[in-house]
Image: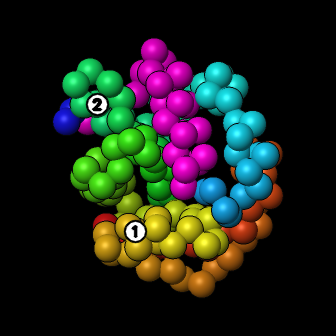
Amino acid sequence: MELRPAVSADALAVARIHVRAWQAGYRGLLPAVYLDGLRAEERAARYAFDRLDGPRTTVAVIDGAIAGFATTNGDELSALHVDPDAWRRGIGSALIARARADLAAAGFFEAHLWLLVGNTRAQRFYERDGWTSDGTRRSDVVWGAQVDELQFRRRL
């Protein structure tokens, strides 16, 4: 597995994983009609991987294909998704380790993330990596969907 910074040519592949991961991971947490209506092409148009400022995305590449990605923005892990066909193969663990290392290298001593309330699978993953909920909740609109989220933190 190769971990490397995302480039603009990766946008559609990353968006496909983003959509598939939402459709599989958030089934039962968000309305099915909403999840089924997500389109990778629409999401890909929002990425700006070649910018020097703002979010940083790392992709995991296996046999020449992107299998997952992690995005950091400031001290936040703002996204970590793996193609559902590649779940439980260590890709997420490799991506989160790289994201933590990148955040520490950027001078942060602590990071945070927001997790969809009820996403117990992801919660177990993050807790195994040392993240803990600080009890802070928020309601937000993500990709046009109203979501309730719980904040997790981790020392780097």
Looking at the rendered structure, which numbered label has been put on residue 152? none
Q: Residue at x 70, y 45 (%)?
A: 35
Q: Describe the element under mark 1 as helix, strand or loop.
A: helix
Q: Is residue 118 left or right of 103 when viewed as pictured?
A: right
Name which residue lies at 51% across and 80% down: 133
User: Where is residue 102 drawn, in percent x and y?
Assistant: 32, 49
Q: Which residue is mark 2?
A: 61
Q: Residue furthest top?
A: 9
Q: Residue 42 at x, y = what percent?
A: 69, 26
Magenta-span inclusion, residue 134:
no
Left/right of residue 86 with respect to residue 8 in the rendered view: left
Give the tally of numbered discs: 2
Report the magenta residues as a range.
Answer: 3-25
- The earlier-in-sequence mark between 1 and 2 is 2
Residue 126 tag number: 1
- Residue 34: image location, x then y, percent: 77, 46
Q: Amino acid at mark 2?
A: Val
Q: Residue shown at 55%/50% (left/top)?
A: 24
Gap between marks 1 and 2, in whole Å?
Answer: 22 Å
Q: Quadrant of residue 115?
A: bottom right
Structural crowding at the residue carrying mark 1, measured as other residues with C-alpha within 10 Å and reported as few (<14), some (14–19) or many (≥20)? many
**For this rendering, which residue is in front, 18 or 151?**
18
Residue 20 visible in the picture: yes
